[in-house]
Image: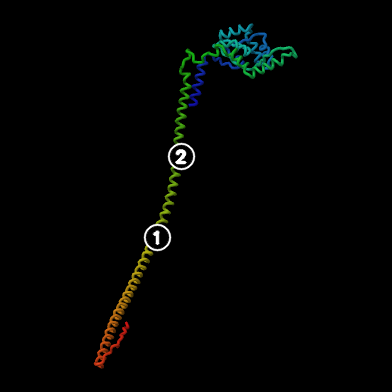
Amino acid sequence: MILTSMYTANLTAHLTLERSFNHISELDDLLKQHEYTWGLITDRNLESMMKNHGNNKYGALVNRAAKLGSLQEGIDRVKDGKFVFIDDSSVITYNFKDSCRSLQTFTGKFQNQWAFGLQMNSPYSGVINDLILRYRESGWIVSRFDRWYKSGKAASCTSSVGSDTKFDLPILSGLFLILAIGAILSVFVMALEILTENETARDEMNVSLNKCEEKEQKLMKHRELFENEKVKIEELALHYKEEIKTLSAEHESLMSSYKDENDTKISSLEAGMKLQEEVQSDYQDVIRYAVLVLQKSLSLLTPNHHYSSTHLTVISLG
């Protein structure tokens, strides 16, 4: 996607500047081509600087350049076509600001400084320097430069593709090549990603299976321990059950023996009490009978005597 976007942007820029692009970006390029001629105004500071430069190629440029007599001549020859006008960037920018058919190339090889000429020790030097610094810091100079140099028709020239630009196969072949390469790379990356994901998933599955096996082994061990404990608990339960049965039998036997003893003791006690009652009853009967016999005997011994104050007391011992 990134490569396609970059190619589309470059294709748009190529189609936009196809009619005006001259493949000249440096002064050296003029010596390597035969399509364009060039020239500069004679008897100017720029001509002198190029002639006296340490690099001989600039001198060759001046020697092979067309000698122009005025600024307007250079402008007219540029408008006629197939001509390169060499001059200061500020001069070219200002004079071609209304031209949409010219292309400016700034090499930056020769720097010129503009200045105000004043008398030495002039009282206006400090004032002018201060004003220039103040205007530069406030942006006033930049705004005036844009207004004077960049407010022409060239600033509003359209950058759309011209009507005479044709989308033929050589222009679009690169786009199809990029799309094909992108599709192949996408398929390769997708296949690699699928393989990587499969390997990752397989590794994760193996790890999960190993963990499951470990957990299953631990579970089996815990189950064996549980079964062993269960057997022990069942054995203890049977043992305690037998003990409980034994204790229950002994308890029943003791209770039965205690009950028999109690029943025997109760029967003996009841029999003793019954015998005591019978003896007491018999004793009372004997006492009564003895009293009767005694009274009878007394009455027989003294029949003619009266005993008015005779009393007989019978004590019953029971």
Which residue is more in the foreground, 53 or 99? 99
Depicted 49 relative to depicted 281: above or below: above
In the rendered image, residue 90, in percent from the top left (x then y), is placed at 62, 13
Quarter of the image for residue 291 reads: bottom left
Dot 1: within a 10 Å radius of its alpha carbon, few (fewer than 14), some, or many (20 or more) residues?
Answer: few
Is 248 on the left or on the right of 137, as rendered? Answer: left
Which residue is more in the foreground, 125 or 103? 125
Is residue 158 in sight in this rendering?
yes
Q: Which residue is mark 1?
A: 233
Spatial separation of the CA atoms under disc 2 and disc 1: 48 Å
Dot 2: within a 10 Å radius of its alpha carbon, few (fewer than 14), some, or many (20 or more) residues?
Answer: few
Q: What residue type is disc 2 on? A: Thr
Q: Earlier in the sequence, mark 2 or mark 1?
A: 2
Q: Which residue is mark 2?
A: 200
Depicted 112 relative to depicted 318: above or below: above
Q: Residue at x 63, y 6 (%)?
A: 70
Circle 1 sits in a helix, a strand or a loop, which is it? helix
Quarter of the image for residue 23 reads: top right
In the rendered image, residue 151, in percent from the top left (x then y), is placed at 57, 13
Circle 2 sits in a helix, a strand or a loop, which is it? helix
Q: How many marks?
A: 2
Q: Residue at x 72, y 13 (%)?
A: 124
In the rendered image, residue 152, in percent from the top left (x then y), is placed at 56, 11
Question: Which numbered circle lies on residue 140?
Answer: none
Q: What residue type is disc 1 on? A: Ile
Colouring style: rainbow
